Image (tube, rainbow, N blue to C red):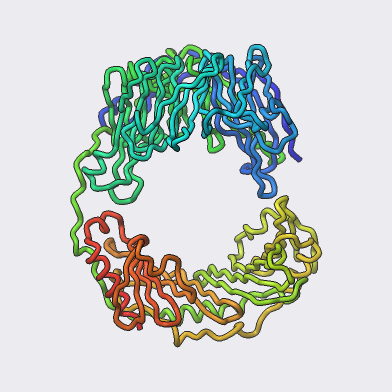
């Protein structure tokens, strides 16, 4: 049973500030700057919203935003029940009343929630979209507590609402009649618009944004464009570029370096962002604290933090490190520890009010009956000058020098004859260790088998198809799986189901989800059995799981004499791992997948996959080219996927090498192709 409470409780915490500093041994900011202040500090905390629920992961709050004073608040509730995720948007008005956004819709009973809810900095206005017919967006006056404007179908295509100003200017992402993406200022009072085409104001070929953030005074717009950061100055119409990673692409020969976690202060004076590589090769990372007024940049190679949140109007940046919240000031460069708020794994969306007086965040409490209560807290920070100071957990020294290119000849091939046939046969024979359903409510058509796993962790799955006489029907197929587990292991697949029947001391589980999915399962000895289907009744599902019977022999013999395997590997001492066997239509065709692993630093993992059907994009001139490989009827090298596909007239074999990006860059395409061809020619 779920219970929701909307109320306000005032909690008072007495906190003594410790005189002990935080030791840090890295980089420029490593000295202990702790104060000796021990004055008792009182913080007050309010619970604005509370919700009781059963499991820790089935409910949480997200997307918190506040007005400047921390009085107006918008947040989103997420609840997962029966594998269906529901979202609900709420706002807190100036009377601390929590109101569901859908109550503002013309039809409060509609299924869609209100979205794109933004508060003006002064907290008077809230723009939102409740998806009412014929209304693009609406504006609610928090002081008058009523809707004051509903804007009908907009003059151009509206993509997103970005925010609203104190003077009733709505910030929008739109598209003009020429298909150009643009930033739009809509004046609600005059019903006029001003447009800035992104391609005209930003030096980017294909602008795309993580975020667009107006400053509180409405004079500047901050664009986080993933590869660059910009500020549009509305008073002059000029654009300032704050950061751009494209020069780093050239320096490191790596176009996977991007900007992450960018945030700007509400007055537009300061910015924080992380420049980081999105691959495992360059390992470039830079944490940037940028004073935009002076263009002073403090840049660090390492930053030990959990999350960087947002700024206030006093240059304080809210940072979560471990179980602490800290305030780093860009002017004084002091870091202060916020007392009493102890973070845990359920804490989230810590948001600093722009006036610096409040923090709003979510947290979860476990109750005595093993249920949970999710809370939305607002904490008054009091006099932050009395807070204990500590060191910013950073290490200085960003290496902007390019990494030395790797040698071209670093991938070596090694000869080996392995026991793939034995491993696949062992997997196939082990299918007799589990039971299979023998009775079905529909006429059996055929089965596809998919068996996988190491000897101690086998999984036997069947995709079972029926002849229902209908071209498209949910009852046309079911999925059955049997997974071997240890004596002390739980059947994870049964955790969402409920016991509905017990036979000879064995519990049978079933659940009917809201989205037509039904599941039934049972654990017998060390095997977890489960059947997944749609639109079957509880009785039908139970009849199938109760019909489990062992098999004395395998379903059919493997044609292992037709299988081919490589004898050359980019691995010094290759080991066969993670086998998967698939049979289609009761043995009409077979396919398999095998991974080859090694332990040496220069070893390159290899996967060989055999399938009967032609792979996607095979022989596509746009993605690769045909090659000649000894012993094969056809061969195709995919530049797009870096794979070699071999065809023997009946089946397709794919070679996939996990080559690091910087090695791929070091090798010419001809060298890569020859590497794959040599492996392909070694099959027997």
Question: Residue 100 in the image: x percent, y percent?
Answer: 68, 28
Q: Residue at x 56, y 82 (%)?
A: 588
Q: Residue at x 71, y 64 (%)?
A: 473
Comparing 679 with 223, the one in front is 223
383 is higher (above) or lower (below) than 98: above
Question: Residue 618 in the image: x percent, y percent?
Answer: 41, 69
Q: Is residue 203 left or right of residue 424?
A: left
Q: Splitting the image into 4 quarters, where does residue 603 fall?
A: bottom left
Question: Residue 602 in the image: x percent, y percent?
Answer: 27, 62
Task: Specify the quadrant that holds the C terminus.
Answer: bottom left
Can residue 597 be seen here? The reply is no
Q: Splitting the image into 4 quarters, where does residue 643 fall?
A: bottom left
Comparing 149 with 208, the one in front is 149
Task: Specify the quadrant that holds the N terminus.
Answer: top right
Can residue 139 be seen here? The reply is yes
Q: Splitting the image into 4 quarters, where does residue 36 fall?
A: top left
Comparing 335 with 180, the one in front is 180
Q: Is residue 620 left or right of residue 364?
A: left
Comparing 205 with 395, the one in front is 205
Q: How many marks?
A: 0
Q: Residue at x 47, y 29 (%)?
A: 324
Question: Residue 14 in the image: x percent, y percent?
Answer: 56, 17
């Amino acid at each position: 049973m779920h219970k929701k409470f909307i109320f306000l409780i005032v909690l008072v915490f007495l906190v003594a500030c410790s005189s002990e500093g935080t030791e840090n041994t890295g980089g420029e900011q490593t000295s202990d700057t702790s104060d000796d202040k021990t004055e008792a500090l009182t913080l007050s905390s309010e619970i604005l919203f509370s919700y009781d629920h059963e499991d820790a992961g089935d409910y949480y709050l997200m997307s918190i935003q506040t007005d400047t004073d921390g009085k107006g608040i918008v947040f989103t509730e997420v609840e997962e029940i029966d594998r269906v995720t529901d979202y609900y948007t709420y706002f807190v008005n100036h009377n601390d009343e929590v109101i569901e956004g859908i109550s503002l819709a013309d039809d409060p009973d509609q299924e869609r929630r209100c979205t794109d809810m933004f508060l003006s900095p002064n907290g008077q206005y809230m723009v939102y979209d409740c998806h009412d017919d014929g209304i693009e967006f609406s504006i609610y006056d928090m002081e008058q507590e009523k809707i004051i404007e509903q804007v009908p179908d907009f003059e151009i295509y509206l993509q997103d609402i970005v925010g609203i100003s104190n003077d009733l200017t709505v910030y929008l992402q739109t598209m003009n009649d020429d298909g150009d993406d643009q930033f739009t200022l809509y004046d609600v009072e005059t019903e006029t618009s001003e447009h800035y085409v992104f391609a005209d104001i930003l030096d980017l070929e294909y602008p795309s944004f993580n975020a667009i953030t107006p400053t509180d005074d409405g004079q500047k717009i901050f664009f986080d464009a993933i590869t660059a950061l910009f500020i549009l100055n509305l008073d002059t119409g000029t654009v300032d570029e704050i950061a751009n990673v494209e020069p780093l692409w050239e320096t490191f020969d790596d176009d996977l370096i991007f900007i992450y976690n960018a945030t700007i202060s509400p007055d537009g004076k300061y910015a924080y962002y992380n420049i980081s590589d999105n691959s495992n090769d360059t390992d470039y990372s830079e944490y940037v604290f940028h004073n935009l007024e002076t263009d002073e940049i403090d840049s660090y190679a390492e930053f030990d933090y959990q999350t960087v949140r947002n700024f206030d109007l006093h240059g304080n940046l809210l940072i979560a490190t471990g179980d602490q919240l800290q305030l780093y000031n860009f002017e004084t460069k002091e870091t202060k520890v916020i007392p009493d708020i102890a973070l845990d794994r359920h804490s989230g969306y810590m948001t600093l009010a722009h006036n610096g007086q409040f923090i709003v965040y979510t947290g979860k409490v476990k109750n005595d009956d093993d249920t949970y209560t999710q809370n939305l807290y607002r904490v008054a920070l009091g006099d932050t000058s009395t807070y204990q100071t500590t060191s910013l957990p950073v290490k200085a020294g960003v290496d902007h020098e390019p990494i030395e290119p790797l040698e071209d000849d670093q991938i070596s091939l090694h000869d080996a004859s392995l026991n793939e046939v034995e491993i696949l046969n062992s997997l196939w024979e082990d299918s007799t260790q589990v039971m299979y359903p023998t009775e079905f409510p529909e006429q059996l058509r055929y089965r596809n088998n998919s068996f996988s796993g190491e000897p101690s962790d086998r999984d036997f799955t069947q995709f079972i198809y029926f002849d229902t006489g209908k071209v498209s029907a949910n009852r046309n197929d079911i999925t059955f799986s049997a997974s071997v587990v240890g004596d002390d292991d739980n059947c994870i697949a049964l955790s969402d189901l409920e016991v509905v029947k017990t036979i000879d001391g064995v519990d049978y589980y079933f659940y009917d989800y809201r989205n037509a999915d039904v599941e039934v399962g049972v654990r017998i000895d060390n095997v977890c059995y489960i059947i997944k289907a749609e639109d079957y009744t509880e009785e039908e599902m139970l009849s199938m799981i109760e019909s489990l019977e062992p098999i004395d022999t395998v379903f059919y013999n493997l044609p292992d004499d037709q299988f081919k395997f490589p004898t050359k590997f980019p691995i010094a001492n290759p080991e066969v791992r993670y086998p998967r066997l698939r049979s289609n239509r009761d043995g009409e065709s077979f396919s398999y997948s095998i991974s080859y692993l090694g332990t040496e630093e220069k070893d390159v993992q290899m996967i060989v996959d055999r399938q009967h059907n032609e792979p996607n994009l095979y022989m596509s001139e746009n993605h690769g080219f045909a090659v000649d490989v000894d012993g094969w009827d056809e061969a195709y090298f995919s530049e797009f996927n870096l794979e070699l596909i071999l065809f023997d007239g009946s089946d397709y074999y794919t070679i996939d090498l996990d080559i690091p990006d910087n090695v791929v860059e070091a090798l010419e395409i001809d060298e890569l192709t020859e590497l794959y061809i040599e492996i392909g020619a070694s099959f027997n």
